């Protein structure tokens, strides 16, 4: 999903979708494949063969796709148990904990169901995670899907934002986005399944041509990036 109220689209275009590819959400990272760029765009694969194009953007009056996942951020003061209970159950491997008191990401925590353990008692922590939505939750958050579905799917094309400021929920929720770009191993890269993530360019995906401008928080759980594609 793209949060449209604060998103600023500077340049956009329509692109053909590669045969057999399904675009599952607005805000996915779209690429072409080296050696077969004319075939069309697809969600980034997290490999060196990707050629960045932009972000999927249907621009319909209602949300174009029945999206399955989104992100949530919760803030806690850690009780004496050293554990906190989330309001929703996160996807495996899609949780990040930031200790606000210490000003650093937490390593070594464990997640069992919707309980996060191994935290420092008395500290304030922010927990960011991705979760699977029920139909009721998706409708409550996004409203009903565009009647008849996204028209571009019938002709094999998708709108692509190639330059601008995007607020997307298509990112790796296990990463500490406050550290984006701080070290060679925490650069913004185009990961698998059309998700932005952090890593070493060329190892975990191609370098993303932009910067993080806004990190997710409990009031607005979207990642804001400013970027420009050569597409």
Image: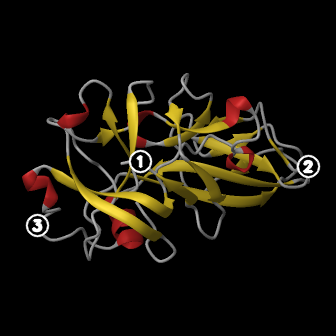
Residue 141 in percent (x, y) is at 42, 70
Determine which quarter of the picture holds residue 201: top right
Looking at this view, is 67 or 31 the one in front?
Answer: 31
Spatial separation of the CA atoms under disc 2 and disc 1: 40 Å
Residue 216 in percent (x, y) is at 63, 59
In the picture provided, is 126 more to the left or to the right than 38?
right
Residue, x 85% and y 53% (percent of image)? 79
Q: Secondary structure at mark 1?
A: loop
Residue 230 in percent (x, y) is at 41, 47
Residue, x 14% and y 36% (percent of image)? 19
Q: Which mark is residue 230?
A: 1
- The local crowd at label 1, few if under 14, some if 14 to 19, many if 20 or more residues have their Cα within 10 Å, is few
Tell which residue pokes out farthest to the front in this image.
Answer: 230
**Counting residues from the N terminus, which is met first, the one under dot 2 or under dot 3?**
2
Q: Secondary structure at mark 2?
A: loop
- In this view, the mark in front (2 or 1): 1
Looking at this view, is 200 or 109 the one in front?
Answer: 200
**Counting residues from the N terminus, which is met first, the one under dot 3 or under dot 1?**
3
- The local crowd at label 3, few if under 14, some if 14 to 19, many if 20 or more residues have their Cα within 10 Å, is few
What residue does disc 3 label?
A: 148
What residue does disc 2 label?
A: 102
Residue 53 in percent (x, y) is at 37, 46
Spatial separation of the CA atoms under disc 3 and disc 1: 33 Å
**Counting residues from the N terminus, which is met first, the one under dot 2 or under dot 1?**
2
């Amino acid at each position: 999903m793209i949060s449209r109220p604060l998103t600023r689209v500077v340049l956009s275009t329509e692109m053909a979708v590669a045969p057999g590819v399904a675009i599952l959400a607005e805000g996915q990272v779209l690429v072409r494949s080296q050696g077969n760029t004319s075939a069309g765009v697809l969600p980034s694969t997290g490999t060196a063969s990707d050629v960045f194009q932009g972000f999927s953007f249907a621009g319909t009056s209602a949300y174009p796709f029945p999206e399955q996942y989104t992100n949530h951020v919760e803030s806690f003061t850690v009780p004496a148990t050293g554990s906190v209970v989330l309001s929703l159950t996160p996807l495996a491997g899609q949780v990040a904990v930031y200790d606000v008191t210490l000003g650093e990401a937490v390593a070594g925590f464990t997640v069992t169901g919707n309980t996060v353990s191994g935290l420092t008692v008395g500290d304030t922590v922010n927990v960011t995670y991705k979760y699977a939505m029920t139909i009721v939750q998706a409708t409550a958050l996004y409203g009903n899907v565009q009647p008849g579905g996204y028209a571009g799917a019938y002709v094999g094309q998708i709108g692509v934002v190639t330059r601008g400021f995007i607020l997307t929920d298509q990112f790796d929720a296990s990463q500490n986005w406050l550290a984006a770009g701080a070290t060679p191993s925490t650069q913004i890269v185009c990961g698998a399944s059309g998700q932005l993530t952090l890593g070493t360019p060329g190892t975990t995906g191609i370098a993303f041509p932009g910067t993080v401008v806004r990190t997710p928080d409990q009031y607005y759980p979207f990642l804001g990036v400013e970027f420009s594609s050569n597409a």
